[in-house]
Amino acid sequence: MQQLSKPATSSDSFEIDFIDLMKLIFARKLIIVLTMLLFVGVTFIVLQVLPKYYMAEARIHISTSDESVQNALSEVEILKSNKIALRVISALSLYKDPMINAYVQRSDSQQLLKDFTSFDDQALAANPLVSLMLQNFSQNLFVKEIGGTDIIRIRFNHKDPQAANQITNAIIDSYQSLKTEQAEGRVLQGRQWLENKLQGLDSVMAAQREAAQNLRTAENISSTDDTKMLATDMSDLLKQQNQLRLVYAETYAKIQDMKAFQRSGKTMNADLSGSQILYNLKLSEQRLEEEIAGLAQRYGDKHPVIIDARTKLSSIKTAIRDEVRGVEQSLMSTLETTEAQINAIDKRIEEISQSRQTGAGALQSLSMIESGIEAQQNLYQDYVQKLADVEKDSALNGTGIEVLSYAAQPLKPFYPNYALSIGLAGLMGIFAGFGIVLLQDRLKNAFHSLPQLEQETELPVYGFSPKVRGLKNQNVAQYILSSAGTRAAEMIRSIRTLLKIKNIESPKIVMMTSSLPGEGKTTLSNWLGVLSARSGEKVIIVDCDFRRASLHKSFARSGNKTLVDYLSNNASIEDIIVRDNPGGVHTIFGKDVPQQALDLIDSKRMQALIESLGKAYDLVILDAPTVHSVSDALLLSKIADHVIYCVGWNKTSRDVVQTGLKKFRDIETKSLSLVMTKVDLEQASHYEGYDLQYYAF
């Protein structure tokens, strides 16, 4: 039995496996392409069904130098707050939008819609339906600072591109409106405080003027020149006294205002408290209380989120109390120091007054009164200037917000992303196609190349026979005759040539078999016999398959005496040999007698017939049954000079082929070779490369 060398080393095997893989993929590229198109098609259909969301984007710049703006992160939280959301929902009537209010058709929702604009923010936020609206609103709102800058990006998603545009711009408008109201509130507070001080100074100056006039009348003083001269020494002390009293009044007012704002729970102006830290803490406290009110609608009192928020609130309140104590102590210290300075000046004035002559007492008193009036007038002018500065700042400073770009109506949806989705689907389809090809190859586990067949079986491969589309049994012999000049015919002739040169003695009796039916052994027997006969050899083909006789069909013959008749002593050799076949090949046809098949093949008459044919012909081709069906082929191999084992290309499992070959090895068949049959030259060329392209036609 002929043997081949062992396979190559592991590194060579790896290269061959990789090359074979690439050839396999290229050969099955249609499957990969169809799988990719399927994935892309299904993805495209799904994309048509999915709801489309549009994103509108706007950008604003905040001026952190403005007292109304703390920092970018603080402003981001304000933009995301429920206060802004409620303003936008109310301004655009989004409570009628099903995307924001999923329960717009419910009766309780309808009642809420009627009363929506009449509720305040706190009452609305406590309503469960409004909480759901706020939640839906915030889920579609994205506010983020652009790192390292004072620019904030605002985005909103909506199924309607126009609604996305309107809501995004409404958020900016509501934010600007809120900041304007806050700025106006601070200006109003400052104006009211200054107006109260001016009113108090008016009352004080009116009383001083009345006292001065009464003193002039009582003492018959017609001019104040002398009074002014007497009061020259005291002028500086009185000015210092008035300035200190102004500091004392402002400090005391700050203490009282801070206590009033603390009791009210409102957000304090940094100017009123004198502490930026305290202002920030009060602002954080207010925001956290709003957040807890919103969370209480979704969670219970013992929920970890509620507990954590309340813990943070408690920490902020503690920090506020500590900061308040510190600020109060600082202001009280300033107040005490100022009071001490005022008392010292008063004492000094009293000393100067006592040192003057008693005769000038009335004139001195008048001078002091008029100096006080002058000092009050200067203080009054200072307050008037401060009021003018407040009005000017409110007109010039604005809100510290600059809109860099309002949102434009989006032209295409950002979700779903068609390009990305289809691209990923195509990529997944390619990989899925690879998987299908590899899985199909593994499940089929067939031979698809001559080197592969030769390497794994370690037997010589004499060539292949091509697969001919549309070929029917009745014109098999005629086809090869009409194609005698093609490269396919040359491949069959090369098999005959190899039979001669690969063996020490040219085998005269050649048996054709295969693992399973339908692998093309009868067609190969036909073509090999016809072409050998045409080349001048005396050839006979014997149909030895008594279970599925088909040789007569390939020659389009019927009604002839068969080998079964001869073995049953019902016909002579001359009766069963058909000599008028195309190409000059002789044939002995068979017949289906499955019950007697084994006995007939194993008979001495069968052996004697084959031996006599071997003497009379140059080539005897035995078309034997398949190996896996019955053991007939094993018996026939005993009387054959050579066995050609047909392997269906990309069809027969490797395990099935190896099992069939093992049967011949077990009985020590003396000469065995392989031929790959029904090779699809177009696909096989991808596996074989130029080797099979040479034989393509």
Image: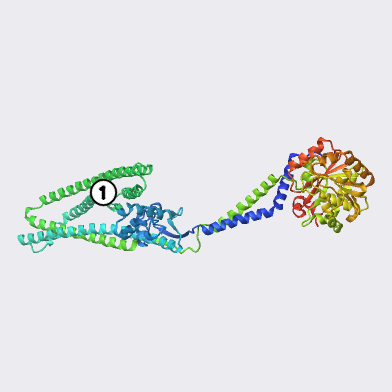
Secondary structure at badge 1 equals helix
| Numbered disc total | 1
Of all residues shown, which one is farthest toward the front?
A: 570
Q: Does residue 330 appear to the left or right of 482 in the view shown?
A: left
Which residue occupies 63% across, 50% down? 432
Q: Which residue is nearer to you in this view: 381 or 432?
A: 432
Q: Residue furthest right?
A: 616
Return the x and y of residue 446 as percentages of the image width and height. Answer: 73, 45
In the image, 658 versus 238, the foreground residue is 658
The quadrant of the picture occupied by the N terminus is top right
Q: How many residues crowd around disc 1 within 10 Å: few (fewer than 14), some, or many (20 or more)?
A: some
Q: Is residue 606 above or below residue 688?
A: above
Q: How is the image coloured?
A: rainbow
User: Which residue bears the numbered disc 1?
Assistant: 262
> Looking at the picture, which amino acid does disc 1 mark?
Gln
Point out residue 681 in the picture as x, y percentages from the top left corner: 77, 54
> How far across and how far down the image is residue 359, in percent?
6, 55
Left or right relative to 139: residue 446: right
Question: Toward the viewer: 135 or 557?
Answer: 557
Residue 71, horizontal then vertical, whole percent: 39, 53
Image quadrant where residue 370 sits: bottom left
Residue sitting nearer the eye, 451 or 327: 451
Q: Is residue 667 left or right of residue 233?
A: right
